[in-house]
Image (cartoon, rainbow, N blue to C red):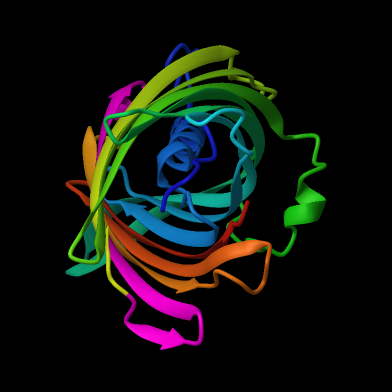
Amino acid sequence: MHKLLILFLLLPFTLFAQTPEEETAQKVYLANINTLLIFTQESGLSSGKYRFTKANFKMETYTLPFNYQLEPFNEKMNWFVNGGVGYSITKQITSTPSTKSGNIIELTHDNKLKTYSGGLGGGLRYKSDWGIDFSGGAGLIYSRVGTSVNPSNDAGDAIKDFFDSNYNDNLTYKFFLSADHEKELFGYKTYLRASFKLYETKSDFTFTELSGFRAQSNVSSLSMGVESAPLLKYEENSVTLEPYVKMNFLQGDIQDVVQFNRYMSLGVLAYYNTPQTPSWAERFYLEVSTVRAEGLEGYNVGIGFTIDY
């Protein structure tokens, strides 16, 4: 189901004296990078919307990741390649309510952050005799981030804005390990998966008041799900459903930004299995999921396909 995760993280607090607007820009910047690290979909072309209720951030993400398993070079091992591209918009609205003549007046500061990213990596998968697949690897992610106090023209200027000189560049190193166990029971495919991902980001700000920094965070995940027996059939093709639940545990700099240390994902995938035609795709899928935590609410919608090899 989840075959790759794109993006990164960072977080500094080694800054000089700042105005409230500069502090807001910094906080939104950090929230955007770390949110992309965790809250982008891993399966296919996807978009998501999130609200951090404690930090009062809003985020929209658009991602296109990929994962390709190469032909096994022996009975138990094969190499794989993964990566992807993404774009996101983050906004923060800081509200200060006051009263005048019995009426509530809400004062707001609206700040927007735009992030572009692209990454490439790979690793090795080993199929053990215990029925558990172990995977490990590394990747490099490049991101380009810019801030604006103008909340209009969200996605319309995305391509043009990428070349804006007011953007700063980041490099993120990603290291990951995972273990998957699958078993078939009464025609249903069950699985249990555990993973650990470490991200280290280095960045040089081009904004005047901000200094260069590096930061590190990691994410541990445990997920379980079950894929149904075929619910509908058309010749050799079939439709199956896969509900799942996933717990994610955060450590490092990211906790200071998002203001929580764990969150849960609940979702379901609908698969259209195509064993024969087309020859290049094993199956297509639609995924809908929601994320919940004390301080977070959001959802993802994604479509994609699994390459047949």
Residue 195 visible somewhere in the drawing: yes
Q: Residue at x 38, y 56 (%)?
A: 50
From the viewer's perspective, is residue 298 above or below residue 3? Answer: below
Query: Residue 245: within the magenta?
Result: yes
Residue 237: % across, % down = 50, 79
Horizontal and vertical percent position of residue 219? 34, 29
Tell me where residue 229 sits by quadrant: bottom left
User: Viewer-proximal residue, 148 or 201?
Assistant: 201
Left or right for 198, reference 213 = left
Part of the protein shown in magenta: 230-256
Classify residue 229 as left or right of residue 90: left
Q: Please identify the quarter of the rendering in which residue 83 is found.
A: top right
Q: Of residues 273 and 35, which is closer to you in this image?
A: 273
Judge whether residue 82 is colored magenta: no
Q: Residue 150: x percent and y percent? A: 62, 54
Image coords of residue 297 (percent x, y) = 28, 56
